[in-house]
Image (cartoon, grey):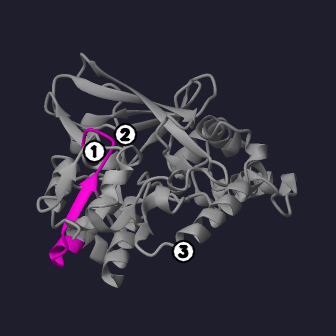
Amino acid sequence: MNKYDYLIVGAGLFGCVFSYEMTKKGKKCLIIDKRNHIGGNVFTYHKNGIEIHKYGAHIFHTNNKNIWEYITQFAEFNNFINSPVAIYNDELYNLPFNMNTFSKMWGVRTPQEAKRKIHQQITNLNIIQPKNLEEQALSLVGTDVYNKLIKEYTEKQWGRACKNLPPFIIKRLPVRFTYDNNYFSDRYQGIPIGGYTQIIKKMLQNTDIRLNTDYFDHKEELLNIADNILFTGMIDQYYNYCYGALSYRSLRFETEELKTDNYQGCAVVNYTSKNVPYTRIIEHKHFEFGKQSTTIISREYPTEWTKYAEPYYPVNDENNSKLYKLYQNLSKQESNVIFGGRLGHYKYYDMDKVIEQALILSNNI
């Protein structure tokens, strides 16, 4: 008789929510992760009084009241509002694109002036049916915003020319004709006071955990200790890349402590020009309004993914979407294996959608 009802591969947010819910239903769960910590990419840790987002900025936002009430049962959230800025060469602009952005760029003051400027640029381009990301973006915001705040940043992020990226990557761009620097328009937004790891610990307090454990290195043993598997890793790796490897983008972080109490004045600054190799700098203390005498920053470098790197973003272009369908069809033939999360579903999810999908899965079971 197997020791566990569920083996959960991956201690990220999806796996942890699923484990918490199934444990409440009386199921015995074992969760494993190849990393040396729980929490996946939402993992945070303390250093000199500052909560560090090890794998990049994670700002919780949602319009779903039920999801907000669900996550806030595990921790108190602060009232952090994401108001990033973008630096292009020696120019600084507010994000998302709003009247502060347009006023700085063109000297306009009213929404009508900004709309006329953008409309004139779009009309002059005469793009009827966008064929790639560049044409899609130009047809939405015109040339000035695209050239300074989108083009080079996007090419750094994806490692490909905008002309070679599909248009649906930018289906729409947030353009606001108000002086509002709140990046998200969701009703609920904030950062857990004390970080995300405390939330994960509470979710897993009744779950057995094995860290530094790669599923593929211990597969024979692990298959014999659980009735069912929730796999939140890469679906193509699970099937030994039998149809070929899916494409991902990876990230590299350089984190350092600086002897200043305030390095950049906000949590996130995007660097949109190609002459800066990183896409953004995160100053962690600003997520929790820190007053420490020193500060800690992380520079974020996008990189091409290899089989030995950490996958962050699925590249959901046409070819990869077709390839994923082949793996998805294989997964439908499984009787006791479930795939979940952004790697198992080959889809980028915001945190609220991760929780929502994990709850749907656990409720259906």
The numbered disc on residue 43 is 1
Q: Quadrant of residue 151?
A: top right
The relative height of residue 8 versus residue 47 in the rendered view (above or below) is below
Disc 1 from disc 3: Cα separation: 33 Å
Instruction: Where is residue 71? Give x, y as percent.
Output: 23, 65
Disc 2 from disc 3: Cα separation: 34 Å
Instruction: Where is residue 16? Give x, y as percent.
Output: 27, 60
Compare marks 1 and 3 and give the one earlier in the sequence: 1
Disc 2 from disc 1: Cα separation: 7 Å
- The residue mark sitting in front, 2 or 3, is 3
Residue type indicated by callout 2: Tyr
The residue under the point 88% across, 57% down is 126
Q: Which residues are magenta?
A: 22-37
Compare marks 2 and 1 and give the one earlier in the sequence: 1
Residue on which disc 3 sits: 333
Residue on which disc 2 sits: 55
Q: Kindly state the secondary structure of the residue where label 3 is placed.
A: loop
Q: Are marks 1 and 3 in contact (CB under 8 Å)?
A: no
